[in-house]
Amino acid sequence: MKGKMKAIIKKENKPGAVLDVVDIPKISPDEVLVNVKVASICGTDVHIFGWNEWAQSRIRTPLIIGHEFAGEVVEIGSNVKSLKVGDFVSAETHIPCNQCFQCKTGKQHICKNVSILGVDINGVFADYVALPEICAWKNSEKIPLEFASVQEPLGNAVYATLEGGGVAGKKVAIFGCGPTGLFAIGVAKVAGSSDIISIGKHKFRMEIAKKMGADHILKYPEDDISKKIEEITDGEGVDVVLEMTGSQDAINYGLSVLKKGGRFTAFGIPSGKVEIDIANGIIFKGAVVVGISGRKMFDTWYRVANLLESKRIDISPIITHKFPLDEYEKGFNLMMSKERKAAKILLFP
Ligand SMILES: [Zn+2]
Ligand SMILES: [Zn+2]
């Protein structure tokens, strides 16, 4: 399709991003062109916008940012077989090579040569995006547009919560009340967890944690996390820890409140190296440690779609703000404010 479009572009190697008018992308034979209907701001976008150390080492400018979205296919490449014009799609944002050991053994989500939408290639904060067929996920029309746009982070939560033994009848501690931590509360609830302990920092988000089904809300750093969890679990510790923050403190608390033989799931990405007590936190506990990167392709996506389509999970409390794409800076400023008064923020091109 020829023409121009609006896009949020990281143009220079410094904080911020600009709204600009650029050419509508040309698609390759293996891609589809998607008209973006709604996109959502992810922590990764905030890192790129804010230009942290990771972004400086990874991002090559200029780049159209954004990766979480839902939209309509308006053009298909000559090799594309599974999609047609008019299809309603979202995207698995990890684009696998399909050649490496991991890809060939059913682990595309940890592909060695992965490239990521809105990180390594142009993303979705725009009117249109060129999307590889392999990453396009066809949505059911039964799923509301706004929910469809956050399936990628919801998928992280589904994968993190359910991988490594499920949570039915188990006590789960979820560290972090960012969107993925909040989604994980909802997932643990529908998956039958008996006690959900949410540990967070921001009052606004902890109210959402309550709405999502957390049974106990602990505030960091004011509450004595270890003591409270000991009380809640009769001194046994929790069966499952979902570590969604990447902070040194949360990781240490998580390992210390984990029951012997329990599961520690690591999802939050630390900003640098962290120090942990491997002997007492993992070895003597016989702990199972599960690392979560991305979403299983496409097992996680089917589960997410089923949960949304069946309305078993209601994620509406987590979607707190909606802005037109032009007002993206409002969204980013909210996401970066010291006291976080937002969870998922949607942008409408
Ligand atoms: Zn994301
Ligand atoms: Zn690969």
Image (spheres, grey):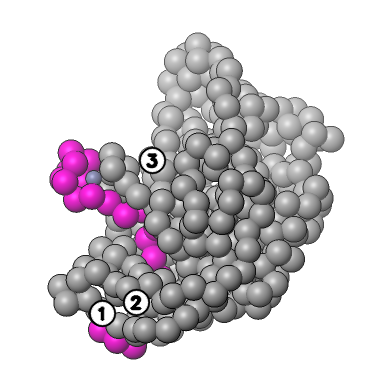
Q: Are marks 1 and 2 in contact (CB under 8 Å)?
A: yes
Determine if residue 67 is in view: no
- In the picture of the structure, the residue carrying the numbered disc 1 is 76
Type of amino acid under label 2: Leu
Q: Which residues are magenta?
A: 84-105
User: Residue 30, position in %: x, y?
Assistant: 21, 68
Residue at point 70%, 72% (across, down): 327
**CA–CA distance in space, label 1 to label 2:** 6 Å
Where is 298 relative to 324, above or below? above
Residue 73 visible here: yes
Spatial CA distance of label 3 from label 1 is 38 Å
Location of residue 209 with respect to 347 vertically, above or below = above
Q: Nearer the viewer, mark 3 or mark 1?
A: 1
Front residue of 113 and 60:
60
Mark closer to the chain start, 3 or 1: 1
Give residue 33's mark. Answer: 2
